[in-house]
Amino acid sequence: MGALEVDHTHTVGGTFPLGITAAKPRQVLAMLAINADSMVSTDQLIDELWPYGPPSTVKTIVQTYVYQLRKILSQRFETPRSTELLVTRPGGYVLALPRDNVDVYRFQELVRAGRAALGEGCPTRAAALLSESLRVWRGPMPTDVIAGPYLGGLNVYLQEYRLEAVSLRIEADLANDRHREIVGELRSLVASHRLHESFHLRLMQALHRSGRRGEALAVYQQLRHILDDELGLEPSPEAKRLQQEILVSH
């Protein structure tokens, strides 16, 4: 996630630059990495690299890109004799790498574990797992690779998944009575995600628990105006219930 990097304890010299600046070979490596340990067909690679129609010699070009990548990986990685990291299969290629070595999968697994911990009533563990998932996130995936249909769609999905991770971590922080500490972060999230009602509700809760009842009610009014002006909608029943709870509280 973020810039496309290779970093492994068994590389010669640790993290290393890919040595390939051309856009399409980097796209191929990104496709293989996010499908680690599974075959990516040649047709999938072609559709990703040339969404508006491939050149006539496309299969030869893909083979050349794979050859370049295999050469670099074999020079940098220490692997057992007769094994390869980039394997050719009938109809496609496999990056023979455990998925937990790829940031995308580490991020998703940490979010799943954090959600489960929150559901089991363990907010401290949930907050730790979700905070770790957000540390893995270094930016949209991948920031330095041109995205075709597959990578572009995956990036949209992961952006939404990150917002879910942030929302869950905030929920865990509220359960851990960290309402005062997260007010500033929530104000920033509300400003940058104006239509994300959940962030408005969490800000209302954090302000109310911090003894800032008037500000919490002002956030509700702000949400109501945004939804009405931009979408012609009313706040959700959950938002209205929270407003009423704050109004009748002492």
Image (cartoon, rainbow, N blue to C red):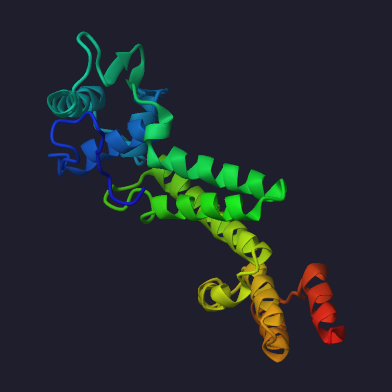
Q: Where is residue 203? Give x, y as percent.
A: 64, 76
In the rendered image, the vertical position of residue 65 relative to residue 4, given as above or below: above
Looking at the image, which residue is at 79% across and 80% down?
243
Q: Where is residue 158? Give x, y as percent.
A: 48, 49
- Quadrant hosting residue 72: top left
Question: Which residue, as the protein is rendered here, is positioned at the far right?
Answer: 248
- Quadrant hosting residue 197: bottom right
Residues 82 and 149: in front is: 82
Number of labelled discs?
0
Q: Is residue 89 left or right of residue 166?
A: left
Looking at the image, which residue is at 46% across and 55% down?
134
State whether residue 162 appears in this view: yes
Question: Which residue, as the protein is rendered here, is positioned at the far bottom?
Answer: 214
Q: Where is residue 142? Give x, y as percent.
A: 34, 48
Looking at the image, which residue is at 53% across and 53% down?
128
Q: Where is residue 170? Give x, y as percent.
A: 60, 64
- Quadrant hosting residue 6: top left
Residues 229 and 217: in front is: 217
In the rendered image, the vertical position of residue 147 relative to residue 14, given as above or below: below
Question: In what quadrant of the picture does the C terminus appear?
Answer: bottom right
Residues 14 and 86: in front is: 14
Q: Is residue 146 left or right of residue 194?
A: left
State whether residue 47 appears in this view: no
Looking at the image, which residue is at 24% across and 39% down?
26
Question: Which residue, as the protein is rendered here, is positioned at the far top?
Answer: 82
Q: Is residue 147 left or right of residue 192?
A: left
